[in-house]
Amino acid sequence: MTLISAAVLLFFVMDPLGNVPLFLTALRHVDPARSRKVIVRELVIALAIMVVFLFVGRYILELLQLSPAALTAGGGFILLLIALRMIFPTSEHSLREEVREEPFVVPLAIPYTAGPGMLATELLFMTREPHRWPIWLGAVVLAWLASAIILYFSSHLRTILGDRGLTAVERLMGMLLVIVGVQMLMAGVVQYLRS
């Protein structure tokens, strides 16, 4: 996997366009003049969490004695669940959280930006090819940067695309993630059968 393809995959997993309404809802009690500062702070915290997890996560896996095949299949399964939630959202299984004051770490940094799918995907990269860590780090930063730009201008983006436009883009990203998730799941099963 190249730097660009890894960054694109991570960008889809982060789903910034799907997060636009979630961010706007979480920030509705925050003064509009301050909301941009809060977004920047939360995005920086999310980046720090993703970078730390990129380098520490595989040691947690080693401690738990999990096989690479299980990680690949599990990562594919998580991506599949996230993609299905993007395509078929329900009020019972919504990612939207009720926030009554200025959010700090939860929910904007975790789980909206540095969510379980994102952490599982970067963990998968590092477990399979740890020697390529500069590529994976670059991919995380590129995906984060693209997401950060979208989320920083979330209020303008909602005005331009509207709720229907954002929903359509999120569904499209979800369909692409389904394919990636199924591919990872099948690769994990094949890897397990060969071992």
Image: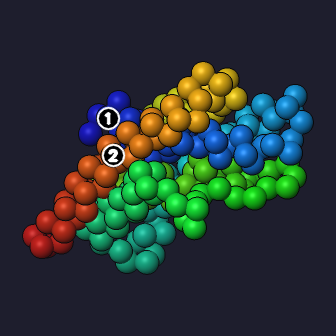
Which dot marks residue 175? 2
The image position of residue 146, as x and y in percent, is 53, 29
Which dot marks residue 5? 1
Residue at 73% x, 37% y is 39
**How was the colour assigned to the protein in this rendering?**
rainbow
* Secondary structure of the residue carrying numbered label 1: helix
Residue 117 is at least partly visible in this image? no
Looking at the rendered structure, the kind of residue marked 1 is Ser
- Whole-angstrom CA distance, mark 1 to mark 2, is 17 Å
Residue at 39% x, 57% y is 84
What is the crowding at mark 2: few (fewer than 14 residues within 10 Å), some, or many (at least 20)? some
Farthest bottom residue in view? 64
Tell me if label 1 and label 2 are in contact, CB under 8 Å: no
Looking at the rendered structure, the kind of residue marked 2 is Met
Which dot marks residue 31? none
Instruction: Report the mark closest to the observer, 1 or 2.
Output: 2
Residue at 48% x, 69% y is 60
The image position of residue 156, as x and y in percent, is 67, 23
Say which label, 1 or 2, has the lower sequence index.
1
**Left or right of 12: which side holds 131?**
left
Say which quarter of the image contains residue 38. Answer: top right
The image position of residue 28, as x and y in percent, is 81, 43
For the residue pair 194 and 150, the one nearer the viewer reads as 150
**Left or right of 90: which side holds 29?**
right
What is the crowding at mark 1: few (fewer than 14 residues within 10 Å), some, or many (at least 20)? few
Residue at 25% x, 67% y is 69
The image position of residue 4, as x and y in percent, is 35, 30
Instruction: Say which quadrant the N terminus sits in.
Output: top left
